[in-house]
Image (cartoon, helix red, strand yellow):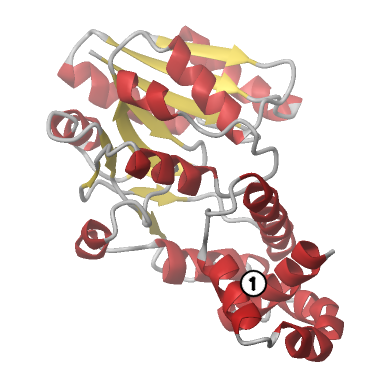
Amino acid sequence: MFSVLIPIFNKDVNELVNRLQKQCEKITPSYEILCYDDCSEEKHRIKNRKLSNLLNVSYVERAENLGRSKIRNRLAKNARFEKLIFLDCDVKLTEKNFVANYLEALDQNPIIFGGVQYQKKKPTAKTKLLHWNYGVKKEIKPLKQRLKQPYKLFTSANFAALREVFLKIQFDENINLYGHEDSLFALSAEKQNITIGHIDNPILHIGLKTNLRFMEDVDNSVKSLIDIKKRIPQFNTKLSSTYDLLKRYNLQKIFAWYYTNKMDQLRTQLVKEEVSLRKLDLYKLILYQQLIES
């Protein structure tokens, strides 16, 4: 008995849910697929409403947007079964035994991350190259590497958890902007000595954003990091640690003097299809410094 939980925002999830249902039916009749729409545009809701006709599928539309953390917590609280599988709405199943793999792994560890994949071929639309390049080079991590850093390399796009354990941790509902809720979740698990296991059970990320939309998420993730640092000073990422290193050697003023006026230029270059993760990291550091010192 298990629950598959999918928060939806502006995506058609019919194909994903149908594939999940076929796998679930082969395992047991005692399952549920909960799909909570977090105030999507009407054109997406019209497509997803047909989900209500599927066996063991519950489709619910929210009247107001809860956000990434609250919607996941709400799904877990309303789930009927002990084993939970969380999936983002912009993913595609590639594993024939995806559901069964998670159910088996949850007998060994209370939280399991299965990994993420991106399409191997570059997207034809150059306006989506930045997201694809970031995903391929930053988010795809082989199992061997993830096992060495089980907390650091956890993300919330594709994971499973025992309901009782998840409710002890939950996602931080103080996070209102995009970004870092999965890092805080993993940190909380580590502090409570709750193991995060890893298996090779990836999903394919298909929701590539335009360069402009991706940069908007980058901006929000940096702002979110600042908000978290104010509440939890000991929370660190590679970005915040790099800034701390500048401060330690009294280089932050020189860095600001040289780079601050270049931030708009960098952002324009990144949006206009110049795919450079090095420039992206530099842009994030400039923005972080401006916000943390303001």
Work out whether residue 168 or residue 200 is closer to the camera in this orientation and state it. 168
Residue 85 image-quadrant placement: top left
Q: Is residue 79 visible?
A: yes
Residue drawn 61% across the image and 30% down it: 173
Q: Where residue 186 sits in the image (x, y, percent)?
A: 40, 44
Residue drawn 59% across the image and 53% down it: 233
Q: Where residue 221 sits in the image (x, y, percent)?
A: 65, 54
Question: Is 2 positioned to the left or the right of 270 in the image?
Answer: left
Q: Is residue 230 above or below residue 237?
A: above
Q: Amino acid at mark 1?
A: Lys
Residue drawn 46% across the image and 29% down it: 170
Q: Where residue 251 sits in the image (x, y, percent)?
A: 68, 88
Q: Is residue 180 above or below residue 11?
A: below
Q: Is residue 54 visible?
A: no
Question: Is 266 positioned to the left or the right of 222 in the image?
Answer: right
Q: Is residue 139 above or below residue 175?
A: below
Question: Is 25 positioned to the left or the right of 65 in the image?
Answer: left
SS type, badge 1: helix
Quarter of the rendering occupied by the N terminus = top left
Q: Which residue is mark 1?
A: 126
Q: Where residue 16 sits in the image (x, y, percent)?
A: 42, 33
Residue drawn 52% across the image and 59% down it: 236
